């Protein structure tokens, strides 16, 4: 069962760019973890409950024992207003193999990790409500950030900036600086266009026209070249790709000639689309499907 979760997680993060999609797997950045999470907090595991809870790891799965950790919230960055503690369920890893298997060593704060919370563990946590509603969970692709890891401070500052956008999207999209509006647009596109990692069925709804228009405009104003010095920053071209524009939306991909810059031509095509067929376009927001 755990292997199925690994396969599902890996499949969910295949690169979207044509040149790399068939040969590489991209690990979630802290900002993408924000986009996937329902709750973002900093805190410390204050206790591990004695009794386990039997629940499926994903909808339709077999019930397995979940250990329950109680996290004392230091700061609720998103989705945890007026809450001091939160319960997080996880499936403890199996006993070590004999002989022991090589250790898993993910990139600190970014790699796939086996979730095994311990009392006293501090971190920046990305949580999602378990589909039964009994507790929260941490998907292995959303491993917490360790305050002792290299680069934690910069990552935490970026996460805080992103959650500020989510707290008041319209304010962020109307910021005085174009760079701040561009950042807000990329965070919101990632949030609104990210599917579920937990097997919850999703559907699309139209984003409010005024917010959609501001997001699309902010994307057109920004620099689409990714920052090679900051791999944790939002990827502008990925934000465009997440919109999922097709010919049905009036978007026409450019014909890029040898020697021409692909991102520059794509941005030109997007700007042309936005001024024409896309002027009244509303972003399709992914939300959990309503139960009938």
Image (cartoon, rainbow, N blue to C red):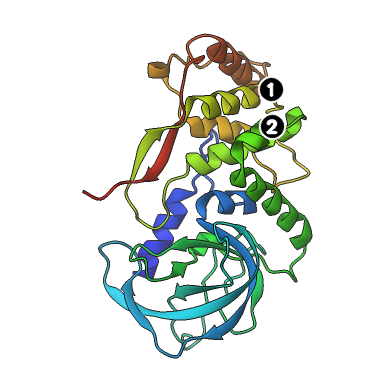
Residue that lies at the very extreme toward the top in this rendered image: 276
In the rendered image, residue 217, in percent from the top left (x then y), is placed at 61, 22
How many numbered discs?
A: 2
Cα separation between marks 2 and 1:
9 Å
Task: Indicate the position of residue 284 as horizontal and vertical percent values.
Answer: 42, 32
Query: Quick check: 218 above or below 275?
Result: below
User: Can residue 30 be spotted in the picture?
Assistant: yes
The tag on residue 85 is none
Which numbered mark, 2 or 1, is in the foreground of this view? 2
User: Dot 2 surroundings within 10 Å: few (below 14), some, or many (20 or more)?
Assistant: many
For disc 1, the marked residue is 221
| Mark closer to the chain start, 2 or 1 | 2
Q: Which residue is mark 2?
A: 181
Q: Toward which corner of the image does residue 33 lie, by quadrant?
A: bottom right
Dot 1 alpha-carbon crowd within 10 angstroms: few under 14, some 14 to 19, many 20 or more: some
Left or right, residue 130 beside residue 164: left
Specify whether residue 102 is in view: no
Residue positioned 67% across, 53% down in the render: 159
The residue depicted at 78 percent of the width and 44 percent of the height is 229
Closest to the observer: 252 or 80?
Answer: 80
Q: Are marks 2 and 1 in contact (CB under 8 Å)?
A: yes
Q: Determine the residue located farthest toward the left in the rendered image.
A: 292
Q: Position of residue 290 (x, y in %)?
A: 29, 47
Vertical comparison of 15 with 245: above or below: below
Q: Quadrant of the N terminus?
A: bottom left
Assign a secondary structure to mark 2: helix
| Residue at the (57%, 39%) spot, across then down | 188
**Looking at the picture, how far across and down is residue 189, in whole percent?**
54, 36
Q: Secondary structure at mark 1?
A: helix
Q: Is residue 141 left or right of residue 204?
A: right
Residue 113, by quadrant, is: bottom right
Most foreground residue, 55 or 143: 55
């Amino acid at each position: 069962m755990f292997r199925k979760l690994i396969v599902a997680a890996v499949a969910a993060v295949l690169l979207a760019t044509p040149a790399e999609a068939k040969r590489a797997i991209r690990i979630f950045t802290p900002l993408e973890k924000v986009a996937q999470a329902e709750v973002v907090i900093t805190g410390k595991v204050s206790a591990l409950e004695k009794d386990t809870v039997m629940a499926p790891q994903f909808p339709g799965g077999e019930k397995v024992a979940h250990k329950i950790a109680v996290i004392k919230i230091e700061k609720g960055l998103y989705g945890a207003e007026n809450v001091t503690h939160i319960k997080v369920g996880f499936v403890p890893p199996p006993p070590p193999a004999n002989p022991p298997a090589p250790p898993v060593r993910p990139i600190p704060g970014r790699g796939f990790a086996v979730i095994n919370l311990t009392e006293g563990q501090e971190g920046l946590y990305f949580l999602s409500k378990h589909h039964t509603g009994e507790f929260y969970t941490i998907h292995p692709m959303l491993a917490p950030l360790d305050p002792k890891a290299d680069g934690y401070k910069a990552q935490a500052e970026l996460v805080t900036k992103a959650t500020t956008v989510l707290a008041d999207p319209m304010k962020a999209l109307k910021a005085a600086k174009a760079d701040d509006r561009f950042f807000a647009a990329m965070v919101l596109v990632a949030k609104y266009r990210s599917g579920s990692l937990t097997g919850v069925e999703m559907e699309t709804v139209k984003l409010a026209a005024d917010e959609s228009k501001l997001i699309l405009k902010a994307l057109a104003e920004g620099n689409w070249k990714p920052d090679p010095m900051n791999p944790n920053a939002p990827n502008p071209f990925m934000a465009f790709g997440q919109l999922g524009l097709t010919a049905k939306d009036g978007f026409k991909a450019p014909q890029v000639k040898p020697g021409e810059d692909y991102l520059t031509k794509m941005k030109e095509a997007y700007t042309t689309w936005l001024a024409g067929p896309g002027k009244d376009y509303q972003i399709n927001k992914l939300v959990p499907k309503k139960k009938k």
